[in-house]
Image (tube, rainbow, N blue to C red):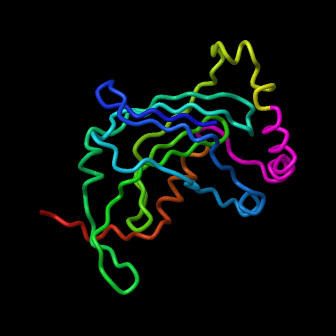
Amino acid sequence: MTEVLFYCQDKLVDASTNGSAGFVGPKALKAKDYRWRIGKGRRDIHPAPDRVEVEWVSYHDKKRYRISLALPAELESMIAQRYRVKVGKEWREERRDNIGLGMATGGYVEAFLTSVRVTPDILLARGIAKEVTDDPYDQRYPLSSQFKNAWARFDKDYRDAYKQYPTPSGMAWAPIMDAYRAAQPKTDEQPITK
């Protein structure tokens, strides 16, 4: 379960509760193919947020995590920036208009600006989320009972692969994700100026 709240000057401007975030399968674990796999993102939030709060339950860590990340003050202009990008045989104006969030083992979180056609992604913020231990509902109904079936399914399908191919944890993810961004094709070489 993942909940994301976007704020601008302490006012809620967008929210998402999307059930579950994805995880890395055995093939990717073996290949150490560590990259964010985006199922959904938040596009064109107006006004642009200056803070994002993320809360999720990690099936791998068997914990609930929460973090608040400050986003860059210039985020609105970053989203508005258009680039001339070749798509197939034609040139198009494209922009990074999707705020992606990546969550990994050990509570590691990144917020980044992304686009299918304008690369590389731009890191907006990163941090280590804290384990949530004071949630009244969790105290009444432990996570192990709330997510019993989902955790059992995860363990059945993925636990052996994670044991065989252990993943980094916490801030050990930062240089890995920096290297991933550095290796992305560079298509943002033609910014469009007014």
- Which residue occupies 63% across, 13% down? 134
Relative to 65, is 189 on the left or the right? left
- Compared to 32, does 21 lie above or below? above
Asked if residue 114 is among those painted magenta in the image, a careful observer would answer no
Q: Give the image quarter of residue 132.
A: top right
The spot of residue 98 in percent (x, y) is 41, 53
Relative to 168, is 153 on the left or the right? right
In which quadrant will I find the C terminus? bottom left
- Judged from this view, the residue extending furthest toward the bottom is 89
- Compared to 174, does 193 lie above or below? below
Q: Nearer the viewer, residue 93 or 173?
A: 93
The spot of residue 157 in percent (x, y) is 84, 51
Magenta segment boundaries in residue numbering: 148-171
The spot of residue 56 in percent (x, y) is 61, 33
Relative to 30, is 100 on the left or the right? left
- Which residue occupies 62% across, 45% down? 21
In which quadrant will I find the N terminus? top right
- Which residue occupies 41% across, 61% down? 115
- Which residue occupies 29% across, 42% down? 46
Asked if residue 150 is among those painted magenta in the image, a careful observer would answer yes
- Judged from this view, the residue extending furthest toward the left is 194
Relative to 54, is 162 on the left or the right? right
The spot of residue 158 in percent (x, y) is 81, 50
Tell me which secondary structure the magenta stretch mostly adopts.
helix
